[in-house]
Image: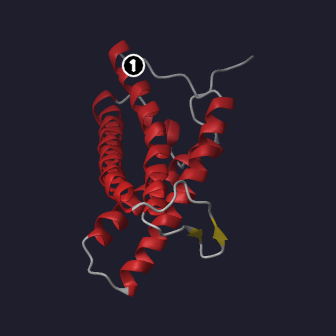
Amino acid sequence: MNTPRTRYSTVAIAFHWVLALAIVGAFGMGVYMSDLPFSPQRLKYYNWHKWAGVTILALSALRLLWRLTHRPPADPPMPAWQRGAAHATHWALYALFFAVPLVGWAYSSAAGFPIVWFGVLPLPDFVSPDKALAEAIKPWHAYLAYALAALVVMHIAAALKHQFIDRDGLISRMSLRG
């Protein structure tokens, strides 16, 4: 007998939590470092932030590939508008998982600061150095990052609503405990 799964796979759960921590960490680092005065420490933080962004981009690609090839568990019963909002939010999150680091990479390229992933692997520039283009791109990286942060907060709020108000077991689908 084939019973429906109620939890995501271990791989999907690992992608979720590793990316969640990486995104929160990269966002926090980005906010912190942006107001620092120019210094070797600030340059080090910028490199760490860029390394995190490239790692998030790579993990997001793997996560999307996994998601497209593995069916998630069925949604718990909920009104159609909530299901629609959840699916739209998830796909918007996926879009921003790619947009934020790609725009950051384009900004870094336009600003003339190549990315050398973990100080070992030089990555190609998206665009040629162009100060005007860099200034045009820079705020979009921040706008998209704040949009991602807002969706993450909404995602967490919705999960907590399901856990403590609806009590429908939705949060257990992505729980680290089996």
Q: Mark 1 points at which residue?
A: 84
Residue found at the very far bottom of the displayed protein: 40
Asked whether residue 178 appears in the rendered view, the answer is: no
Residue 137 drawn at (x, y percent): 36, 52
Q: How has the structure been colored for display?
A: secondary structure
Residue 68 drawn at (x, y percent): 64, 30
Residue 65 drawn at (x, y percent): 65, 37
**Above-or-below relation of 125 to 81:** below
Q: Which residue is drawn at 39% across and 86% down?
A: 40
Frontmost residue, 121 versus 52: 121
Frontmost residue, 99 versus 158: 99
Q: Is mark 1 on a helix, strand or loop?
A: helix
Asked whether residue 8 appears in the rendered view, the answer is: yes
**Above-or-below relation of 10 to 124:** above
Residue found at the very far right of the displayed protein: 1
Frontmost residue, 73 versus 40: 40
Residue 92 sits in which quadrant?
top left
Q: Residue at x 61, y 34 (%)?
A: 67
Instruction: Check disc 1 and give the amino acid type.
Output: Gly
* Side of 84 where 118 appears, left or right: right
Q: Residue at x 34, y 21 (%)?
A: 82
* Side of 167 where 1 appears, left or right: right
Looking at the rendered image, the quarter that the N terminus falls into is top right
**Picture mark count:** 1
